[in-house]
Structure formats: C-alpha cells, structure tokens
Amino acid sequence: MENTKANNFLQTIIADDIKDGIVKEVVTRFPPEPNGFLHVGHAKAICLNFGLAETYGGRCNLRFDDTNPEKESQEYIDSIQEDVRWLGYQWSGDVLFASTYFDQFFAWAIYLVEAGNAYVCDLSAQQAREYRGTLTEVGKNSPYRNRSIEDNLGLLEAMKAGEFADGEKVLRAKIDMASPNMNMRDPILYRIRKLPHHQTGSDWVIYPTYDFAHGQEDAIEGITHSICTLEFEDHRPLYDWFHQHLPIGNKPNQYEFGRLHLNYTVTSKRKLKQLVDQGFVSGWNDPRMPTLAGLRRRGYTARAIRKFCDMIGVTRSDGIVDVAMLEHAIRDDLNENAPRAMCVLNPLKVVLTNYPEGQVEELMVPAHPNREQMGERLVPFSGELFIDAEDFREQANKKFKRLVIGKRVRLRNAYVIEADEVVWDDAGKICEVRARIIEDTLGRDPADGVKAKGVIQWVSADRGERAQVRVYDRLFTDEAPDRGDKNFLDYLNPNALRTIEEAMIEPSLTEALPEQNFQFERIGYFVADRYDHSAAAPVFNMTIGLRDTWNS
Ligand code: ATP
Ligand code: MG
C-alpha cells in the first residue's frame, strides 16, 4: 500500500536520488498546454510539482507545452499564470515556452534522420491507422520506411519550407511496428499544420508532437523528475527512447501519478470549453465551474485548495474523490477564518411595537465567535427589521424553534422578541409581523424565565442594505456525468444558480472588499464577487452551505 500522506512515493524516490547523489538540485516543472483554463485537477499537479521542489529546496518551472497552435491562445497563457500565482506558487525564472525550443527540436529531427532513425512517411491518416495494427495484431512497415537518408532530409526540409499540404506527409521515428507498445510503432514526430502560432507567428508550418517535444523540453531545462499522470505510462519507453537516440547529456526520468477525478464534476478542458462556448455557464470563471478561476470567484481560498490536494495525497492509482472532500476543505477553512455577518435572503418585515420610534442601538458584536483577535463589528438595531420569511410561522409544532405567534425567539446578537400578530397584504400574503422586544434581554435570558427556544438572524430595516446574492449548487446532478457513453450535458443541474435580487445585509457588509469571505450566520459561506461587487451595489456569491445537505 502506498503511503499517501507525509511521504508519498515520489518523495521517496526523490529523497533516495538525493541520498545516492544522483540528483543535486531537484528540478520539476508544471507543463500545461495553454488550451483552456486550469481546473481543480491541475491544482493537484501544481501542488505536487511546486510542492516537491519546495520540500527539497529545488525549483519548479512553469512551461507552456505549446506545440498545438490550433487550440491555444494568449488568454489561456495569462489565466494559467494568474492561477498558479493565486494558488501561492512562484515558478523559477521566466515563464518558459516549448515553442522557444522549436529550432532545437528540428535539429534533433535531422539528427534522427541522419542516423537512420526517422523517415518521412506519405501514408494518409487512414492508411497509417491500418498499418499500425491493434493491441492484438502487429503493425506493418510503411512502404516509405526505407527511403534513403538523402531523400528523407530533402523531404523534411521541404515539409518545413511549406511545400506540402496539411496531412500530406509526416516525420516518423523508425522504431518497431511489431512492438507490443503501440506508442513505439513508428510514432509521428512532426506534422504539417499551416497555422500561425501565438508565440512563433508564421515561422513554422510543421509542429512537433507531444511525444517528440515533451521529453526534450525536460532535457533542455534540466528537469530531474518529470512527473505526469498515469495515462502517459505507456509513453515512457518512447520518452526514454528519444533520450537514448539523441545527443542529450542530461536524461530526465518520467514518473506517473494518478489523475484527480472528482465526482459530480468534469475535469477535462475540452468539456469545460464546451460549457463555455455553448453558453451553459457565463465563462471559464463562472462560479459553478471547477476551474481555479471559477472556484476562486465562488469563494474558495487557495489555502483550502492546497489543503484539499494535501488530503487526497498522491498515489500511483486512479481513483474518484468525493467532491464532499473539497467542500469539507473550504468549510473548514472558512469556519476558522471567515468573519461572521448577518444576511436575510428572503426578507419579512418585523415591527417591534414597544421599541421607541426612530431609536437605533449600535450593538458591538464579535466578528468571530471564538477568535477575539478578529475584532468586532457594529450592528445597528432598530424598531423595524427583517427576518427570513422561512423563520416565521403563524403556528408551528415544537420542532420549529423560530418565530411563531405567541412565542419567543432570540435575535442573534440582540434581544429576545415575542410575536403578536401578522399583517396581510392585498394579495393575502403575510407582509409584516408585529412583535415586541422583551426588555433587558441583551446577552441575558428573560427575567420572567420564559426562554427563547431558538436564535435567528435579522437585519435592521432602516440601516440594512440591499444586496444581490447568487446561490450556487453543484453543476451536475449525476455523480459521474461523463462516464462511459453518457453525455455530460444531459446532467446539468438547472438549479445550480439562483439569483436573489433583494436580499438584506447588515451595513458593515457594504465595506466588504471584492473576494472577501464571510459566514452569513445560519446560512453558509459567501464571498463578495470579485468583479461585480461594490459598496453601492453589493453582490455576494454563495461558496457553500454550512452543512452538507446534498445527500439528506
Ligand atoms: P485536460 O484533459 O483537462 O486537457 P491535460 O492533461 O490535457 O488535461 P495539460 O494542460 O496537458 O492538461 O496538463 C498539465 C499538467 O496537469 C499535466 O502534467 C497533467 O498531467 C496535469 N493534469 C491535468 N489534469 C489533471 C488531473 N485531473 N489530475 C492531476 N493532474 C492533472
Ligand atoms: Mg491536453
């Protein structure tokens, strides 16, 4: 059984390499392709790579694996850097781009051709598939496999010069069409792709494949431990083959770990892009998205995400993690660190008939129930307030420990009140509750011994402010929305966003800074929206409810 906590298998490998003198300085890298925003799965890879460098006093590069211009963009490059920094990591030196090594890759391609280890192949994609064989059937040699070195060199230069159309020719390594490992059956090194590149412009019309680029990028950068996810395990022999057949001194090693899969979530940039492009969400940073930008806007803290990555550990097997664990990590963090505040989502007016008209009491209440150092805030109390409509019933049984006609309830941080009667509007809806405060109940029980059973939150009608509150739920209703041949779009939760335009908040909340987290007492954790919140028009996003109510 792998040790998943203090000392995962990669730490063991690295510690041994250092002890044996094989490695002096640990160099890792995080190598995203800039074809989308980072998601929570990437957080695992980031924490792992940067974390290992940190633990062993080494360094970690941020390198864009930008070999596929078709799907890449500057927007993604920018967002990825922002997200890595937000998570709390700083890469070593400048941001790196695989595309800055294109000349070197091409020189190495020529080297392989000259050594008789690569050839230009004219098979169409369809033919190449047929020649490739299957897992149970060996492949066949391409009829172009025995071209002379001179012919290959000439054709490769012509490919580079743009003399052929997309797909007309490819450069392949000459390895073994009978290998049981499909990746070793003369894999493609270069493809013709007549597209401008975001970094190299129109310099190139041929682009290296992931396999031909990745290990060489690692070698150029002196990566000591190239850590990737398990689906690349079968690529490792090829990764090593290039290092053996190229004039490369430094030979990095590839290690694989299990990808993060979260239930109720999709973690594939392609699918997330579909949600964005087809308008199912408002963008990559929509708070419903499992992207880092989305989680951030939802109110997740970098600290909680790092903690979560720590909790799930790193093993050599793929497993599905319950999204409740991620939710637990943020609840835990915010319970500890978020100041408390009061908000009423569905306001019902309460008029306190025995409270002096026009009087306002400025109550000083703690920002956090058990962290004095977080200070106090001022909460104005007045004769007209709002409570949540859900917290009132004309009649109720004993289980309902909120406000009921003829019964008492404690207003959080303030008085005990007793409800007397209700007022209906013309439509027959309760629009007001008339009640009384019980004197002398600030911080103490009523003198007559009739205690309040419950506590509810409230906001002064005179001094409270209106706010827009966006209440979020999980984006998918199914535990495994993209498993098997299911279409994840069929399992979108139509109630994943509910916008409440007229919530009431205590006045101190208008001073909230964008991205500041709070616990709205009795409701959940909320964050001032990073983009839309202002003192004049407050907007709060629900991060997560106080308790896990999903399965109840
Ligand atoms: P996607 O399928 O979402 O596009 P990817 O693996 O193609 O993911 P890259 O940009 O190539 O995305 O990933 C950069 C790094 O992040 C790689 O090392 C990759 O292995 C790692 N990574 C991506 N997704 C996960 C995940 N779910 N769990 C752990 N690591 C991941
Ligand atoms: Mg990818």
Image: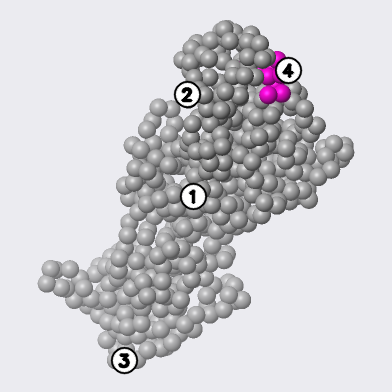
Looking at the picture, which amino acid does disc 4 mark? Ala
Front residue (pair 231, 238): 238
Report crowding for label 4: few under 14, some 14 to 19, many 20 or more residues within 10 A (C-alpha): few
Extent of the magenta region: 110-119
The residue that mark 4 highlights is: 115
Looking at the picture, which amino acid does disc 3 mark? Gly
Q: Secondary structure at mark 3?
A: loop
Q: Is residue 117 magenta?
A: yes
Report crowding for label 1: few under 14, some 14 to 19, many 20 or more residues within 10 A (C-alpha): few
Q: Are marks 3 and 1 in contact (CB under 8 Å)?
A: no
3D distance between C-alphas at marks 1 and 4: 41 Å
Does 515 appear above or below 240? below
Q: Which quadrant of the figure has residue 375?
A: bottom right
Does any atom of ligand 1 lie closer than 8 Å to the CB of label 1?
no
Q: Residue at the spot x=28%, y=78% of the render?
A: 350
3D distance between C-alphas at marks 3 and 1: 54 Å
- Counting residues from the start of the chain, the first of labels 1 and 4 encountered is 1
Say which mark, if any, is on residue 358. Answer: 3
- Counting residues from the start of the chain, the first of labels 2 and 1 encountered is 1
